[in-house]
Image (cartoon, rainbow, N blue to C red):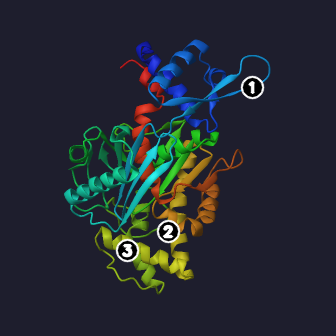
Amino acid sequence: MQRGTNLGRLGDFNQAVIFESIRRAVDGVSRVELAGSTGLSPQTISNVVRRLLDDGLVREDRTIVSGPGKPRTVLELEANRMVSIGIHLDPGVITVVMLNLRGETLHSRRLDVPPVEVPAKTLETMAATVEEIIKESGMPRANVIGVGVATPGPIDRDRGVMIDPPLLDGWTDVDVVEPLRRMLNLEVVLEKDTIAASIAELWKGNDAARDNFILMYVGAGIGAGMVLGGEIHRGVSNNAGEIGHYSTGVVAQPCDCGRNDCLHASLSFNNVARKARAAGLTLTVPDDGNPEERAEGMRQIVKMADAGDERAVTLMRDCMEKVGQVAGQLCNALDVSLVIFGGPLWSHVGSYCLDGVREVINERFSSKNVHGIEVRSSTLGHEVGAIGGACAVMDATLSPKAAALLLR
């Protein structure tokens, strides 16, 4: 039950609302326009804008004349006044990006087939890469407000610990935040990869449809991020979006969960590799290999598809249509009108599979006579998780949160 409004935090909330409006105004915005879009009084707008100017987060850019009366001063975002770093740990790739307040990627690194089996060494690699990017950017270190790490779940976000990710051997109960904080001397936050990717889409998007959507994350693992009413749905432990054991309706192989028709069973590498070999495709990695070998096996299948091998294309489409079946179930449960597919693997297979998953989702959707489901690929490519990690830092620092007004 809601407990009322914490008026002591109302000023911070209003500032976040105004700043977000300025951030999203690509061509700048006047104080009068801010009052109209936010519903706040001119006095509140004036007080908040003065604080933002004093903090160097916005600047007065130019004046415009619009009819009679005093010319209006346009406020512009000082996009590089604050930057954040995002790190995405996928079993097959590590991606690191630097993002500014506008959500623009200033610098990035991609480490394919990284040695992820030893957590301590992996964290050292992450820290070294962050230092390289900061140095390369020439950005004052004081402008870096923090580092967001996106990883497979489940996680303990409050403690900064990865609990037991199913596709990362040796990462049970691994503290991610404290070692990186110590090595970098920067604030570090941990975020589940699917939630991070959803934050990225929310931060980078301007269309109204993005207030309610599902983000289907397709990497070494599969997960879902959910945005409802403009807010990220996290669940009670920040682990929402685990869809690996949803039924696909098709028998695949026995799974640890006791079923044989779940998404995890269908898309596990050993099952995909078995189907690849049955189709006549040659893989140079074992079916039950380590994370690096599994990632290499998927890359080999993608390369075959890119070379025009229809057997590889058919295999990928079959796998992704299983994901579409589960996405359709989520659409029925949440009644959204938009599904976005993204992630390291999707950036390679999306061009082959988008039409197929779109058809499956809309066919599965039970309210199709009321509205359809728009299905599209993320424009953020393989960096969506890392961008989400960086956005998570920005989001925690700057975005308006209605929940912050409730008494605790």
Above or below for 270 versus 56: below
Q: Callout 1: few (<14), some (14-19), or many (20+) C-alpha neighbours within 10 Å?
A: few
The structure residue drawn at horizontal position 75% and vertical position 16%, both measured from the top left corner, is 69
Task: Name which quarter of the figure residue 68 lies in.
Answer: top right
User: Of marks 3 and 2, which one's residue comes earlier in the chain?
Assistant: 3
**Amino acid type shown at disc 3:** Glu
Check disc 3 and report the residue beneath it: 296
For the N terminus, the quadrant is top left
Q: Position of residue 66 (x, y in %)?
A: 76, 25
- Kindly state the secondary structure of the residue where label 2 is placed: helix
The structure residue drawn at horizontal position 45% and vertical position 80%, both measured from the top left corner, is 276
Look at discs 3 and 1 and give the one toward the viewer: 1
Label 3 and label 2: CA atoms lie apart by: 17 Å
Check disc 1 and report the residue beneath it: 65
**Amino acid type shown at disc 2:** Cys
Q: Position of residue 299 (x, y in %)?
A: 43, 73
Label 1 and label 2: CA atoms lie apart by: 57 Å
Horizontal relation, residue 137 to residue 70: left or right: left
Check disc 2 and report the residue beneath it: 319
For the question of whether residue 17 can be seen, the reply is: yes
User: Of marks 3 and 1, which one's residue comes earlier in the chain?
Assistant: 1
For the question of whether residue 272 can be seen, the reply is: no
